[in-house]
Image (cartoon, grey):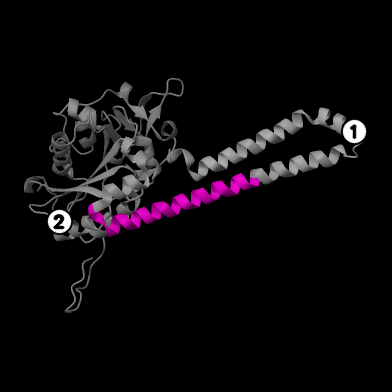
Amino acid sequence: MRALWRPRTFVFAYFFCSTAGILWLVLNYNSLCSQMGSSGGNHKHPYLMHAINQDYKEKQTFLHDTEQQLKEDRKNLQGLAVRLRQQYPDAVGEITDSINPRNKSLPTIYAVTPTHTRPVQKAELTRIAQSFLHVRNFHWIVVEDANRKSSLVINFLKNSGMKYTHLNFKTPEQYKLGKNDPNWLKPRGVEQRNTAIEWLLKNVDATKNPGVVYFADDDNTYGLQIFDEMRDTQKVSMWPVGLVGGQMYESPRVDKKTGQIIGFNVGWEPARPYPMDMAGFAINLKLLQEKPFAKFDLKAKRGYLESSLLVNLIKIEDLEPKADMCTKIYVWHTRTEKPKLKYDVKETDIRIEV
């Protein structure tokens, strides 16, 4: 009953009744004027129409102003929710659900982020967290490439204001990049993504708690629209990714008549089964649970890591194009420039975490 009498309900009821009255006057205008004329009234037709139009314009203005106020109130409420979640991390779920009860009915987005210790680690996590904070029904799975969880990531997640799971798995030394190796020489984050998949299979029942899995690396930039796009993924959805593969963007090619993905617009190694960046697809959790053998291959050739998982899950004709039939860019593989650290900080009694 309380939901029925929200401020928005009053606004629309008022507007509906006012509009109905105006329409009744317009439809009965001639008969009313005839009656007034026969009774000796001196009412002029133009004045009556002007009054009706003026009243209608006032109602339109009132409705527009009220809608703008409601939008502003919602924005302020979301900002308050973010601050409360950061201040009371142990009550993240209760705060989020009380602000918007519809969250409980939305499929959860499980974003998997592999991370490793490096100078820009906290900066990278901070940047993407600012986007994730605004996504409804969101669960962040952060997996460190380490034998033990670091205090930096522990404290960061504790104060992030998000629902999260913190895991760790150390990549075998023979599969790790050397200090001077280029980024592309060996696949990265493989064991960490597989660890997250294993955790999801063991701890979440997709039949009771539907969800979507997205591999959100910490060196990307995410627009909020991409999370709305992926949320209703039935099997595997795909979309373009900007600034990747030596191109301005890589994208699935969609048949305009059928709406199906029929190929890929990529420049490098186009013969790969699924030549898309990790940021360019999402998977329904139920599909992963139906095919628990599907994992990323630690020994995959350069550029074939994404394909090593997807070939065990889907056929190209079953892919779901998103982002306005793959014509919009909502995620970019930006990468943070590696800092040039030439000098040591002078000795000080203050230890600052960067």
172 vs 45: above or below: below
Q: Is residue 351 left or right of residue 214?
A: left
Q: Which residues are magenta?
A: 61-90
Q: Position of residue 354 (x, y in %)?
A: 23, 65
The residues bearing labels 1 and 2 have C-alpha atoms spaced at a distance of 98 Å
Q: Which residue is mark 1?
A: 39
**Residue 69: in magenta span:** yes
Give the residue displayed 62% in from the left and 47% down from the top: 62
**Residue 101: in magenta span:** no
Q: Is residue 198 left or right of residue 280?
A: left
Q: Amino acid at mark 1?
A: Ser
Give the residue displayed 41% in from the left and 52% down from the top: 77
Give the residue displayed 30% in from the left and 32% down from the top: 270
Q: Position of residue 19 (x, y in %)?
A: 66, 36
79 vs 10: above or below: below
Q: Amino acid at mark 2?
A: Lys
Q: Nearer the viewer, residue 129 or 33?
A: 33
Q: Which residue is mark 2?
A: 179
Q: Nearer the viewer, residue 198 or 336?
A: 198
Q: Position of residue 157 (x, y in %)?
A: 22, 55
Main secondary-structure element of the magenta-colored stretch: helix
